[in-house]
Amino acid sequence: MSEFMMIFRHTPNPEQQPTPEEIQESIKQWQDWIGGIAAQGKFVSTNRLGYEGKTLQANKDVTDGPYAEIKEIIGGNIIVKASSIEEALQMAEGCPVLQYGGNVEVRNIMPLN
């Protein structure tokens, strides 16, 4: 079984102001999806990324915000165990970010040996 990282991307909409109930429903959708993966014994770890960041360039220049020149942001990731990238993609099909027009990039993790 190999490990795969799913990277969640979306375009933020500053006009969207979800109600507390909508926020709770979104949290529940994420918990249910990740819980389903964990119930299969295929969950490794997950993280949600904040909106603040800085990017250090090779020439030592620092810019505000991660990837400030693009509109799409990376909101977080999950690492799962799967027998193939196709199986990992099947798990990604239930990701809540897809309901909001976002996308999930699935990448294999190469062990450092």
Image (cartoon, rainbow, N blue to C red):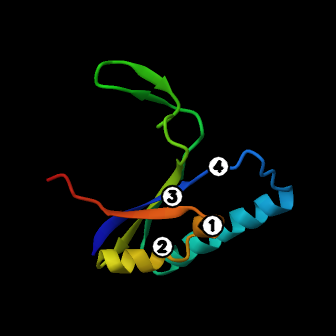
Q: How many marks?
A: 4
Q: Tell me which label, 2 or 3, sits earlier in the chain.
A: 3
Q: Tell me which label, 2 or 4, sits earlier in the chain.
A: 4
Q: Which residue is mark 3?
A: 8
Q: Which residue is mark 1?
A: 30
The image quarter containing residue 99 is bottom right
Give amino acid for label 3.
Phe
Give amino acid for label 1.
Trp
- Does residue 46 appear anywhere in the picture? no
Could you say where residue 29 lies in the image, as x and y percent from the top left? 67, 70
Tell me if residue 35 comes above or below residue 15 in the rendering: below
Q: Which residue is mark 4?
A: 12
Q: Tell me which label, 4 or 1, sits earlier in the chain.
A: 4
**Measured Cα–Cα span from mark 1 to mark 3:** 12 Å
Considering the numbered disc 1 on the image, is that residue within a helix, a strand or a loop? helix
Q: Are marks 3 and 4 in contact (CB under 8 Å)?
A: no
Dot 1 alpha-carbon crowd within 10 angstroms: few under 14, some 14 to 19, many 20 or more: some
Considering the numbered disc 3 on the image, is that residue within a helix, a strand or a loop? strand
Could you say where residue 63 lies in the image, as x and y percent from the top left? 47, 24
Q: Nearer the viewer, mark 1 or mark 3?
A: 3
Considering the numbered disc 2 on the image, is that residue within a helix, a strand or a loop? helix
Tell me if residue 37 comes above or below residue 63 in the rendering: below
Q: Which residue is mark 2?
A: 92
**Measured Cα–Cα span from mark 2 to mark 3:** 10 Å
